[in-house]
Amino acid sequence: MVQRNRPRPAVRGAGALAAAAALAALLAGCQPAAGTAPAASPPEVTVSPVLARSVRPWDEFNGRIVAVHSVEVRPRVSGAIERVAFVDGQEVRRGDLLFVIDPRPYRAALASAQAGLERARAAASLAQLQAQRAQTLAAGQAISQEEHDTRSAGLAQSRADVRAAEAAVAQARLALEFTEVRSPIAGRAGRALLTAGNLAQADQSLLATVVSQDPVQVHFDADEQSYLRYLCAARRGERAVQVGLADEAGFPHTGRLDFMDNRVDPATGTIRARAVLANPAHRFTPGLFARVRLEGGGEAEAMLVDEQAVLTDQDRKYVYVVGDDGKAVRKDVTLGRRVGALRVVQSGLDGRERVVVDGMQKIFYPGMPVQARERSPQEKEDARVVRAPAR
């Protein structure tokens, strides 16, 4: 039986044509379409030139306001509190009445002592008359020498009794005065810890506290290097200290360093220092936190960068600088002390660089292209504002 075959060359030609059309469509899909956005532009960062200026270095510490005089008011005699004579938190002068202890027992004791004094004086007068009579009789040998000596000794004993009675009167009068508890210093009183009706024990019960207000002291601990720098400044007669409170910018108050301890604590490597600060407006309250700035030497030329430009990589500090090729380059730096919002750079820069101060988070790797924008004049002015650095 004869079989008829279909024309296969025509089928192969149609398949080749379909494959060519599919390849052309695939290549067309790989070409960029019209209107597609170009590649992203480099990120914009803000740069500022390295500053070169003469600076006066300061060492900064944390301290506390301390009263020059602080007194715990305690009674000198025991008794019931009869009256509280001040308002809690009141400013008092030296000698102002604070508490009154029931004085009646002490008035009675004073009256008894005064009666004893009168009795002793009467006995002394009698003894003196007897001694004088014995002296006359002894001159005429009318009494024995023993009797004369006895009467003379009685006169001496009576005089001693008078002095003892006078001392008892003085002590009773002093105890009566102590029933009025008065402020030993001028300053500000705290709250009354015992009120009327409570029993106060002599030299034990704490009635209140009084602290002086003007001047005040600032206590702080300085490290060894700062202490050695201070010694050099002290030889030049420079003892100025600047102080700022927690709610203040900078260090608006000026004081005087008046004491350095006689030894450095070997456990901490610090030495206790004390400054005196005038407080006419009574703004400084004992116990307040204070930031202290102590001059650490004379003026010197230094390179400075903005504090916010400094980044940390483990134990190394570095900054990004933008060169003429528009690439951000990392440079490791060695830093010195803070000068307001700036930081002294001891090494790592030559002073001609432009340092990235804003937009560092946009730099993903060293050498990345960036668009550098110079800091505006207003931003430069804001950067000069002194911020309180954290130690």
Image (tube, rainbow, N blue to C red):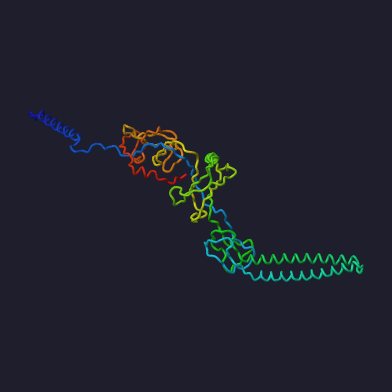
Q: Nearer the viewer, residue 341 or 212?
A: 212
Position above or below: 278 against 352: below
Task: Provide residue 43's location: percent of width, then percent of height.
Answer: 30, 39
In the picture provided, is 68 more to the left or to the right than 18?
right
- Quarter of the rendering containing residue 305: top left
Q: Nearer the viewer, residue 356 or 238?
A: 238
Task: Provide residue 79's location: percent of width, then percent of height.
Answer: 63, 67
x 42%, y 33%: residue: 348
Position above or below: 277 against 319: below
x 55%, y 56%: residue: 212
Q: Nearer the viewer, residue 181 or 279?
A: 279
Task: Provide residue 72's location: percent of width, then percent of height.
Answer: 59, 59
Position above or below: 315 against 117: above
- Quarter of the rendering containing residue 164: bottom right
Q: Nearer the viewer, residue 364 or 65?
A: 65
In the picture provided, is 354 more to the left or to the right than 95?
left
